[in-house]
């Protein structure tokens, strides 16, 4: 009897091993390295130069584009009422480079001032304390970031916030319910250039620095890249942010309300 039971046990083990061997193999789930939508050119770490900076115990990746002073008059602000992708907007308007614009409502309208081709498409928002800054380009080619905007002669403009750097000094911000999110901004350097910058985690292109940390992080990036920032303005961030340069395209996850475009 003992030998019969032992034989049955061996047979059962053998059948079990054979059954497990016959089970279909499930491949491991891969995590994509790129951000894509239906109309984008996603970037991968292999396709672009890495700009990595360590700040306050975390690493951040950033993409930036410098608009030379002589090319600033070719910068324009384009609204996106049809909710096109950034890539399509950039193609339609022949942009060399572009970055997302400011905050917008659920129906796609800008939350603050937006002026394009000397026409005010949206009036200034005097209620929101967050929208405390303007980027504007005058008809004479002069551009600035400031808390107020001239009453005439404005060719292009957008309102957003908060202001990050004023008169070369990084602001100390206190933000309620601050979150880690991808950030976009527009800045002016002391030598007269305009800079587009988008910042995010190397491990997650949708997440990035706290908004309260952005002024000091931007200053650190300036030190790394030999850029002295005179002023800087926060733009929309998170899923509704992206940047296009001649070398890279970091696509948005949701539609942007507008873009700042260099022709």
Image (cartoon, rainbow, N blue to C red):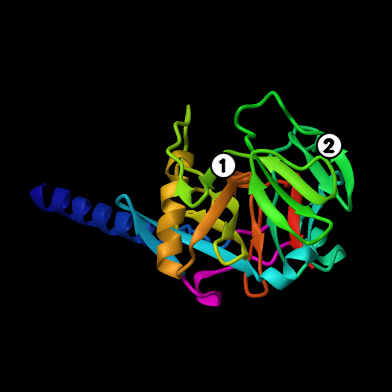
Q: Residue at x 71, y 40 (%)?
A: 159
33 is within the stretch colored magenta: no
Q: Residue at x 78, y 64 (%)?
A: 73
Answer yes or no: is residue 38 visible: no
Magenta-colored span: 35-50
Q: Residue at x 48, y 57 (%)?
A: 29
Rounded to the nearest angstrom, the CA distance separating label 1 from label 2 is 20 Å
- Tell me, for residue 33, which label it has, or none: none
Q: Please state which of residues 78 and 190 is positioned toward the viewer in this rendering.
A: 190
User: Marks 1 and 2: which is nearer the front?
Assistant: 1
Q: Quadrant of residue 224?
A: bottom left
10 up-or-down from 178: above or below: below
84 up-or-down from 191: above or below: above
Task: Please give left or right for residue 159 compared with residue 116 in the image.
Answer: left
Report which residue position mark 1 lands on: 163
Q: Residue at x 66, y 53 (%)?
A: 252
- Chief secondary structure of the magenta portion: loop
Q: Please state which of residues 165 and 206 is positioned toward the viewer in this rendering.
A: 165
């Amino acid at each position: 009897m003992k030998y019969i039971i032992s034989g049955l046990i061996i047979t059962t083990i053998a059948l079990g091993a054979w059954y497990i061997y016959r089970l279909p193999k499930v491949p491991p789930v891969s995590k994509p390295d790129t951000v894509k939508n239906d109309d984008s050119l996603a970037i991968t770490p292999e396709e672009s130069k890495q700009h990595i900076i360590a700040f306050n115990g975390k690493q951040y990746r950033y993409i930036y584009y410098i608009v030379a002073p002589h090319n600033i008059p070719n910068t324009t602000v384009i609204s996106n009422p049809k909710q096109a992708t950034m890539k399509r907007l950039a193609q339609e308007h022949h942009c060399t480079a572009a970055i997302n614009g400011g905050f917008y409502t659920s129906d796609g309208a800008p939350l603050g001032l937006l002026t394009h081709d000397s026409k005010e498409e949206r009036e200034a928002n005097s209620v929101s304390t967050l929208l405390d800054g303007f980027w504007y380009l005058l008809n004479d080619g002069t551009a600035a970031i400031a808390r107020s905007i001239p009453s005439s002669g404005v060719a292009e403009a957008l309102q957003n916030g908060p202001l990050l750097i004023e008169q070369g000094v990084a602001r100390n911000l206190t933000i309620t319910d601050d979150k880690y999110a991808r950030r976009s901004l527009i800045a002016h350097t002391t030598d007269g250039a305009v800079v587009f910058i988008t910042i995010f985690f190397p491990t997650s292109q949708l997440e990035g620095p706290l908004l309260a940390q952005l002024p000091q992080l931007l200053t650190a990036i300036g030190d790394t890249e030999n850029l002295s920032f005179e002023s800087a303005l926060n733009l929309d961030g998170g899923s509704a942010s992206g940047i296009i340069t001649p070398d890279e395209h970091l696509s948005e996850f949701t539609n942007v309300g507008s873009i700042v475009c260099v022709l």
